[in-house]
Amino acid sequence: MIPEESILKIIRYAAKAPSGHNTQPWRFKTGSDSISVLPDFTRALPVVDPDNHALYISLGCALENLIIAANEFNYETKIEFTGDESKPQIIVRLHVAPETEKSGLFDYIVRRQVTRNKFSNDKIPNNLLRGLFNDTQDEGVQTRLFLSETEIESLNHYIIEGTTRQFSNKAFVDELVSWVRFSEKEVMLKGDGIWTASMGLPNTGRFVGNIVMKNFITAGSEARRMEKLVTASAGLALFMVNKNDPHHWIKLGQSFQRFALKATKYQVSHSHLNMPCEEPEVREKLIFDLQLKELTPLLLIRFGFSGPMPYSFRRKINDLVDL
Ligand SMILES: Cc1cc2nc3c(=O)[nH]c(=O)nc-3n(C[C@H](O)[C@H](O)[C@H](O)COP(=O)(O)O)c2cc1C
């Protein structure tokens, strides 16, 4: 029997994970010696993520945090999957093991953030790159790096096309705006969503924010903004799965989260440019042009050096846990 306070402590770290639009699409169910990580489909994103791949990637990120935190507090973990294969649930069994190997990444769980500012253009030294990407792979997950200026710019038109398609789609903008939190008061109340400050935007309140996002941020202005961010990156990383199913989406989330924590350790910033992976026709072009064959690209990440941004918020633990 594991003390409830230890279980809750571990869940707190799991819930620090990143998630699409900061929906935090998870619930945690505690057992006497286990924590189940369950998808919360009431927090799905039907427009940008109709097959729920981003939802399951987010669950994978939370699972990786959970394992790292459990190990840190001297619990060994064993992972089991239950439920329908198309909607799996994760059970993490814990048992006390003081000699459990530690990842060295625990301290970075609370410091990690998705940093949406412009990076500095400085390149990342090779030894650091090796450290970042040498062991991020889970079975069935592959990462492709784009490091030279030519390689980075070769992805620009996919990013622009993805952004243009998304911001020309009213349903996409409406869904995004419903998850933007336009003031500190709103974000503190809800504990979720993307706070404007974390995007480098002013706190306008919802009324003005709604008008600005729906009328002044256009497909063209957003595409131009993205192009500048891409060009200033030290590199891009494309995270892919060799089978496009929830099990592999979870694995990809685990790999990505380890990358994000290591990047935090090395003071390397990272942020998402997933649009080409989210728009089906652009994704097909990417697969064909890059000869990815059986691989499905799911996350496109820019990385480089920059200062921090304000941190995003999380919901209260009582709202996430079924004891
Ligand atoms: C699967 C997944 C998809 C995401 N997609 C995007 C994206 O397209 N654009 C973006 O700016 N951030 C994206 N994010 C980052 C989230 O918005 C971010 O994790 C969330 O707002 C919480 O902030 P934090 O990671 O700094 O704690 C994504 C994160 C995950 C896990």
Image (tube, rainbow, N blue to C red):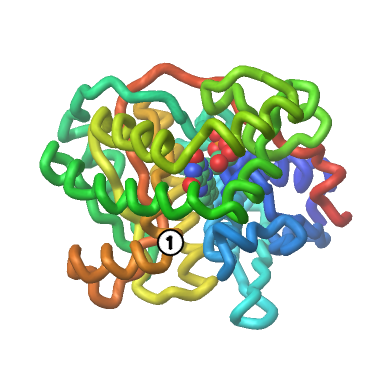
Which residue is found at the position 74% from the left and 23% from the top?
Answer: 205
Residue in the image at 33% along x and 39% along y? 302
Secondary structure beneath label 1: loop
Of the 4 image quadrants, the one containing the C terminus is bottom right
Residue 186 falls in image quadrant: top right
User: Where is residue 120 drawn, in percent x and y?
Assistant: 28, 20
Q: Does any portion of residue 198 appear in the rendered image?
A: yes
Q: What residue is at 30 percent from the left and 48 percent from the top?
A: 237
Q: Is residue 177 left or right of residue 201?
A: right
Residue drawn at 86 percent across, 56 percent down: 322
Query: How many marks do you count on the picture?
Result: 1
Task: Tell me the kind of residue under disc 1.
Answer: Glu
- Check the image and report above or below for 156 versus 82: above
Q: Is residue 166 left or right of residue 156?
A: right
Foreground residue among 184 and 162? 162
**Residue 318, position as x, y percentages in the image:** 86, 43
Write down the residue under mark 1. Answer: 279
**In the image shown, does 88 or 163 lie closer to the viewer?**
163
Q: Quadrant of residue 242?
A: bottom left
Q: Residue furthest front?
A: 215
